[in-house]
């Protein structure tokens, strides 16, 4: 099923917009120069994307506006939960890794969940940019989009924030841990 067919009820939309507005107003440093009224207009005109934002919220991501792409006229939302979203942890990197596991398979993969939710997993650069807005993943870690050449060799990247710095590491793509999930982004 595609995102266009997934919709929120009027009540769910109203509740989500309320949550996003409170978060927007509490974290003005994340979106300097943007006004909530403009954000709300874009959100109300983006039905299918609201479902994706709802999924980000439902799984613990605490999505917020972190930028505006003027050329594309798009708001950029990212997961801003202090730690990796709780509803997206204990997943391996992608479905290829999930299918390769013979025992103790996790329920899903980061790339699979992101696709199901209609969002993109953060890149290394996006993860670094997010860290300029606060401290994220100081106790957890998050899978990040892995270059194809590394993935072909069986590995995948994840990042965290420790000792005042962003670190990226590698692991087998089929690994999963209770403290590792993934963060997503969505353009509206």
Image: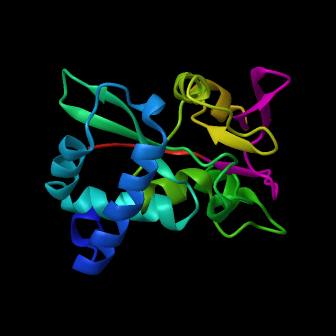
Q: What residue is shown at x 47% (from left), y 58% (from top)?
A: 56
Left or right of 177, for residue 128: left
- Return the residue nearer the eye: 103 or 57: 57
Main secondary structure found in the magenta portion: strand
Q: Is residue 95 above or below residue 25?
A: below
The residue under the point 63% across, 55% down is 85
> In the displayed structure, would residue 109 be above or below residue 132?
below
Camera-nearest residue between 59 and 30: 30
Q: Which segment did they paint magenta?
A: 155-182
Which quadrant, please, contains the C terminus?
A: top left
Asked if residue 117 lies in the magenta stretch, the reply is no
Asked whether, in this view, residue 106 is left or right of residue 40, the answer is: right
Residue at 58% x, 22% y is 132
User: In the rendering, at what x and y percent does residue 66 appear?
Assistant: 42, 34
On screen, residue 133 versus residue 72, left or right, reads: right
Q: Which residue corresponds to the image point at 66% horizontal and 41% vertical from the top-left?
A: 143
Q: Quadrant of residue 72?
A: top left
Is 177 contained in the magenta span?
A: yes
Q: Is residue 16 above or below residue 187?
A: below
Report which quarter residue 185 is drawn in.
top left
Residue 151 picture location, percent across and down = 65, 34
Classify the position of the N terminus by image quarter: bottom left
Image label count: 0
Q: Position of residue 117 (x, y in %)?
A: 43, 60
Name the residue nearer the viewer: 32 or 183. 32
């Amino acid at each position: 099923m595609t995102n266009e067919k997934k919709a929120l009820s009027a009540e769910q939309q109203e509740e989500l917009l309320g949550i996003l507005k409170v978060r927007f107003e509490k974290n003005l440093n994340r979106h300097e120069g943007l006004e909530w009224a403009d954000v709300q207009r874009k959100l109300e005109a983006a039905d299918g994307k609201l479902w994706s934002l709802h999924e980000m919220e439902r799984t613990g991501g605490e999505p917020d506006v972190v930028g505006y792409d003027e050329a594309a006229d798009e708001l950029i939302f990212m997961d801003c939960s202090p730690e990796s979203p709780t509803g997206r942890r204990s997943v391996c990197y992608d479905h290829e890794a999930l299918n390769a596991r013979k025992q103790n398979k996790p329920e899903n993969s980061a790339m699979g969940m992101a696709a199901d939710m209609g969002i993109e997993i953060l890149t290394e650069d996006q993860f670094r940019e997010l860290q300029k807005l606060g401290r994220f993943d100081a106790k957890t870690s998050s899978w990040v989009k892995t270059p194809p050449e590394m993935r072909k060799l069986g590995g995948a990247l994840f990042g965290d924030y420790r000792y005042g710095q962003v670190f990226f590491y590698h692991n087998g793509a089929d690994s999963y841990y209770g403290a590792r999930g993934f963060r997503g982004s969505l353009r509206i």
